[in-house]
């Protein structure tokens, strides 16, 4: 099972405050574990404030009020930028422009180097971005165990939910990808 480029949608019974009503975009999933970013839990700072803290001037006013997200409980002091692909050379589309970038099969990239923020500061960089502090991680077999316990629903990711859907609607929109509505889900996990 490989859930890279999928959403994990927390079941209503999820009691962990970090993941209650969360939608996690999985950037990587392998036999070694999984890594993802929560896409619907904004922090109390926006991109304008973040850029001021790292002493960059954000010259893309349309991004100033965008929230910085709480990507997960791991390395919460570190930034992660989920964005549409930006390639160095058209003839080599597997090479990203930015130094520390994970190319995610399915069409997105996740960058951890400051150069993507510097590009945004100059008015360049990817058009669609989600910036988070911290990430979510599962060790070997941990996510599979949580899935077996009915803690999460999974569905192929739709970038429109990440980049074009208002934050407060992302949980419900992700559920709709499965044809489900939150009120129809039981908070109790069942096993056949």
Image (cartoon, grey):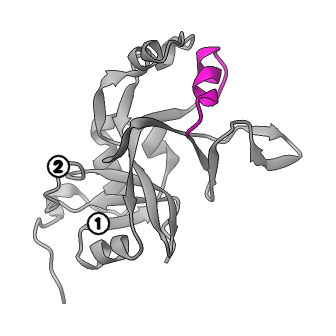
Seen from the viewer's position, the closer of residues 63 and 45 is 45
In this rendering, is residue 140 above or below 27? below
Q: Position of residue 36 (x, y in %)?
A: 43, 54
Q: Please identify the quarter of the rendering in which residue 119 is found.
A: top right
What range is drawn magenta here?
A: 112-127
Which residue is outermost to the right? 91
Which quadrant holds the C terminus? bottom left
94 on left or right of 46: right
Which residue is outermost to the bottom? 192
Seen from the viewer's position, the closer of residues 112 and 87 is 112
Task: Examine the structure image and report whether residue 121 is included in the region drawn in magenta.
Answer: yes
Q: Please identify the quarter of the rendering in which residue 84 is found.
A: top right
Q: Position of residue 79 (x, y in %)?
A: 46, 35
In this rendering, is residue 36 above or below 126? below
- Seen at 36% across and 60% down, the residue is 8
Which residue has dot 2 on it? 17
Q: Which mark is residue 152?
A: 1
Instruction: Determine if residue 140 is in view.
Output: yes
């Amino acid at each position: 099972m490989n859930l890279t480029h999928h959403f994990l949608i927390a079941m209503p019974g999820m009691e962990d405050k970090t993941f209650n009503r969360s939608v996690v975009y999985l950037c990587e999933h392998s036999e070694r574990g999984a890594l993802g970013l929560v896409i619907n839990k904004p922090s109390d700072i926006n991109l304008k404030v973040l850029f001021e803290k790292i002493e960059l001037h954000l010259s893309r006013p349309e991004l100033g009020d965008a929230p910085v997200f709480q990507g997960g409980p791991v390395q919460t002091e570190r930034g992660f930028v989920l964005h549409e692909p930006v390639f160095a050379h058209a003839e080599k589309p597997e090479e990203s422009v930015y130094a520390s970038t994970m190319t995610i099969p399915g069409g997105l990239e996740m960058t951890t180097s400051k150069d993507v923020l510097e590009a945004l500061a100059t008015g360049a960089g990817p058009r669609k971005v989600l910036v988070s502090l911290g990430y979510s991680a599962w060790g070997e077999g941990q996510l599979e165990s949580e899935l077996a316990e009915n803690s999460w629903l999974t569905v192929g990711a739709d970038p429109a939910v990440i980049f074009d859907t208002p934050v407060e609607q992302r949980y419900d929109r992700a559920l709709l990808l499965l044809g489900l509505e939150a009120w129809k889900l039981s908070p109790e996990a069942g096993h056949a």
